[in-house]
Image (cartoon, rainbow, N blue to C red):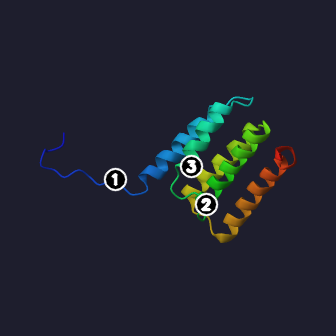
Amino acid sequence: MRDQNETPKPVHRRAGDADVLALAEGLASALGRTLDRTDLDVLRTVAESYPDVGRDGAGEVVASLKGLIDDFLVAGAYDREAILVHVRAWRFMVSRKPDKRERLKILSGLREVRDLYAPSCTV
C-alpha cells in the first residue's frame, strides 16, 4: 500500500506509444477474414494516434499501415495478412530498434506488400 505522502512514480513519456501499439495489435488480431469497414476505420484511427507517425522506424511502418488501410477502404479490397505483417513490423521496430540496413529492408518489404494491392486499389 502506498503512503499518502509518497510522490507518484512519473509515467515514461513513451508509455502511451506502447499502449497504442498494444491496442493496434489487439484490433488487428481480431480482424475477420472478410472486409469490415468499421473494424478497419477503428484500426486506422488507433494508428493515427501514434505520435511518431511517419518518423524513422516504427512511425514509417505506421504510415505504411495507414496507407494500406486507406487503399483497402477506397477500393473495397482486403487482406488480413497484409495488415498483420504491418502490425508485426511495427512491434519489431519498437522492440528491436533495427539498424539502418535492417530498417530499410523491412520498409522495402512493406512497400512490396502494399504494391501487391496498388493495381486493385486505384480509383
Amino acid type at image mark 2: Gly
Q: Residue furthest bottom?
A: 100
Residue 108: x %, y % from top left: 76, 61
Give yes or no for contact between labels 3 and 1 (Cβ–Cβ under 8 Å): no
Element on which disc 1 rests: loop
Which is more foreground, mark 1 or mark 2? 2
| Residue position for label 2 | 54
Q: Residue at x 72, y 47 (%)?
A: 68
In terms of sequence position, does the residue under pointer 1 or pointer 2 come before the other? 1
| Residue position for label 1 | 11
Q: Viewed as shown, does residue 36 lie left or right of 53? A: right
Give the quarter of the figure containing the N terminus: top left
Which is more foreground, mark 3 or mark 1? 3
Element on which disc 3 rests: helix
Which of these two is toward me, 87 or 116?
Answer: 116
Which of these two is toward me, 63 or 112?
Answer: 63
Amino acid type at image mark 3: Glu
| Residue position for label 3 | 48
Element on which disc 2 rests: loop
Residue 3: x %, y % from top left: 14, 45
Amino acid type at image mark 1: Val
Q: Quadrant of residue 32?
A: top right
Q: Residue furthest front?
A: 123
Separation of residues labelled 3 and 1 (CA atoms) = 22 Å
Give the quarter of the figure containing the C terminus: top right
Give yes or no for contact between labels 3 and 2 (Cβ–Cβ under 8 Å): no
